[in-house]
Every structure is written in structure tokens, then in C-alpha cells.
Image (cartoon, rainbow, N blue to C red):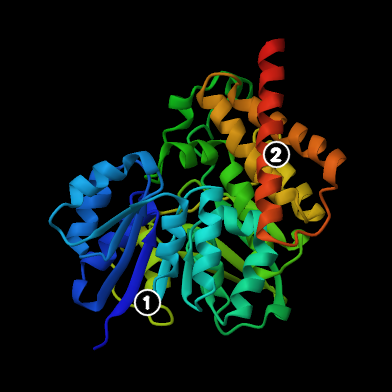
Amino acid sequence: MKKRRVSIFGATGSIGQNTIDLISRDPDAYDVMALTGSSNIAQLAADARSLGAQIAVTADERLLPDLRAALDGSGVEAAAGEAALLEAADRPADWIMSAIVGAAGLAPGFQALRHGTTLALANKESLVTAGPLLLQEARAHSARILPVDSEHSAVFQGLVGEDMAAVERIIITASGGGLRDWPVEALASATPEDAGAHPNWDMGQRITIDSASMFNKAMELIETKEFFGVAPSQIQTVIHPQSIVHALVGFNDGALMAHLGAPDMRHAIGYALHYPDRKTLPVERIDLAHLAKLEFYAPCDTRYPALKIARAVMETGGHAGCVFNAAKEVALDGFLAGRIGFMDMSGVVEATLDAISSKIGLSNAVETLEDVLQTDQMARKTAWTMIEQHAEKA
């Protein structure tokens, strides 16, 4: 059987590591072309050696000597920097995991699509900041994009064989994050340590804090609009503490199609890896009798202002998603640095959206990837200004 050529961008993060776990269970089925990471050189090199990757790339050029030393004698090529990431994306591959966090994942994803590959998309920023461009690029090169977020994978699976014209609504579930049971008035005093503990999912610090603030879910709402082409009014969110139901699709006959699974990212990764087939995955099987109940309730805008901001962003379109993403990343940096409080992050994002709107007009169509990157940088600088102004007043 011919081996599938695969690359993993963002190999040292949680999505990348779960992808490697699945590939490592059937190593004879894959040729690993490229692995990329950032600062965790030891993990990147170890995985590149064990998988026999052609090349390992660190985004940080200063760490290239460390990577070369770690790969010495392995036969794995070492490279570093933005140009090396793009060169790795140019290498022939049948399937590429796009799991680089942040705007840094945009260019490699676009580059990979130009080769007509299948892009397993875990990089939220790609659809939020440049959704129409990304989908246009895929169509132009007969490439396929498969969602890897557990929620969007669930929606995708629920739509197999269905007519989009029959879809009335898409319901994205949210755990509510690590602070969901805190009194609203106590949230302002939450620390990064408080927000960085998740009751269900094992994720990195930044995405776990984004889960607590629901900025992560806000991004997923925007992604849903872009990927599935539905109106903002058709997208709903519910809090579901058990994280068993990942999403539901509602149809015009009143039926709801739900996707259930244990909170394990290997569900969505495995589905994308083996699509259109299903193969056995090493994940927990749900015992419904043991679960006993599944809870759902509406999110509170006061507790989760990010959701309200996301709805305004979806209605505006254009550059709004790019500004939203950049501002929320900077706001999180400000929170982690102790410059602003947990509940101040949404204020920074709103203020940044307002400021950029007066400069460029948020609803103007995004024409090129360069437009996205320029708007991203403008928004980041503006968001930092908002944080400094807040810190001066505090």
C-alpha cells in the first residue's frame, strides 16, 4: 500500500502531539515530510527522529543551532525562520495538519493549499482573519480543507449527506471554562492561574484562558460562519459543562443532529486524518448510563462579553475578524503580564475595533493576504496602546 505523505505544522503543541500519537500507532502507513515547532526543540527533534521526518523547522531562527545539534546524525534536515516554514509547506504532501497558533499559521496554510493538498485546519486564525481568501485559495487549486476543531468537525460530520438548504441552525457547545462557577462579581480578580485550569480539556495555557473568557468560543462562532457559509443569526451557543456533545445541527423538519464523544481531540484529528473513512481510534467510549445526564444552558453576556463582540464582528465582516483576533491575542498578553484584569480583555478588544474602524472601515473587503497581515499589525499596535492607557488609569 502506498504511504501517505504528511506534514505537521505546530507539531509540539497539543494538537500536533495528538496527531503524532495517531500517526505513530501506524507508522508504516505514513511518510512524514515536515514537522515544525517553536521553542520546544527537544520535543521537535525527538519526534522528527522517531518519525523519520525529512525536515524539522523551528520558527525561532535563534534556536537553529540547538535544533541542528539535537538532530545530529539522524539524517533529518534542520531549518529555521519564516522562509523555512514556507519552504516546508512547499514540500509535496497529501495531508497537512495546520496547528500553528496565531497569525503565524496563515502563510504556511495558504502555501500548502497552492499545491492542492488536504489541509486539516486547527489554526482558528486562518478562518477568522481571512476566511473568504482561504476558501477561495482552496477552490482555485482543487485543495480540500477539513476542520479539526472538535466543534466544527462535529458540524461537518453532522452535515455529511445533508442539503445545506435544509439547515436552520448550528449550535456550538461550550464548557464554560474553568471560571464558569465563579460569581460574576469575582471574575475581575481572577488570575492567569485561576483561568488557566480547565475542568475537562487538557490544553495549553493561552487556549485554556481563552476558554474561560469564551474568546475561544467567540472565534469558533466566526469560524462557523466562514466555513459553513451560514448567517450569523443561524449560529447559537450553549453552555454544556460535560463537554460530551460537541455541536448540533438543526434542520427545517425540527430534527437536531448531535455529535457526542469524549473530550479528546483525537476524535476530530482522526476523522480528518482518515477522511472519508472512519478508522478505530484509541479514545474513550461513552457510557451513557454512567453519565446519567447532560446539561445545557444559555451563556450570560455579562459573564462572557466576547460572544456579543463576536456577533458584531460576524455582522460587519471584512477586516473585523482580523482586528478581533489580533486584539484578543494582545489583550491576553496584557492579562498574562498583569497589565489588565481578566474582565478588561473584552474592553481592550472593543476599543481596538472602534479605533481601527475609524481608520480603515472594518467592513471593507479583504483583498489579499498582505491586507490581512497589515491589518493584523495595525490592530496589535492599537491594542497595546489601549492596554497602556488602561494601566495608566488604574
Q: Tell me the number on the disc at residue 297.
A: none
Q: Is residue 263 left or right of residue 213?
A: left
Instruction: Find numbered disc 2 in the image and state the secondary structure of the residue it sits on.
Output: helix
Q: Tell me the number on the disc at residue 274.
A: 1
Which image quarter: residue 275?
Answer: bottom left
Residue position for label 2: 379
At label 2, the amino acid type is Ala
Q: Earlier in the sequence, mark 1 or mark 2?
A: 1
Q: In this rendered view, identify the residue nearer to me: 349 or 361.
A: 361
At label 1, the amino acid type is His
Please, is residue 295 above or below residue 276 in the view? above
Image x and y of residue 260, in percent: 45, 64
User: Disc 1 to disc 2, how far (Cα)?
Assistant: 38 Å
Instruction: Find numbered disc 1 in the image and state the secondary structure of the residue it sits on.
Output: helix
Q: Can residue 255 be spotted in the picture? A: no
What residue is drawn where x is 83% and y is 53%? 363
Q: Is residue 178 left or right of residue 20?
A: right
Crowding around mark 1 (Cα neighbors within 10 Å: few <14, some 14 to 19, many 20+) is few
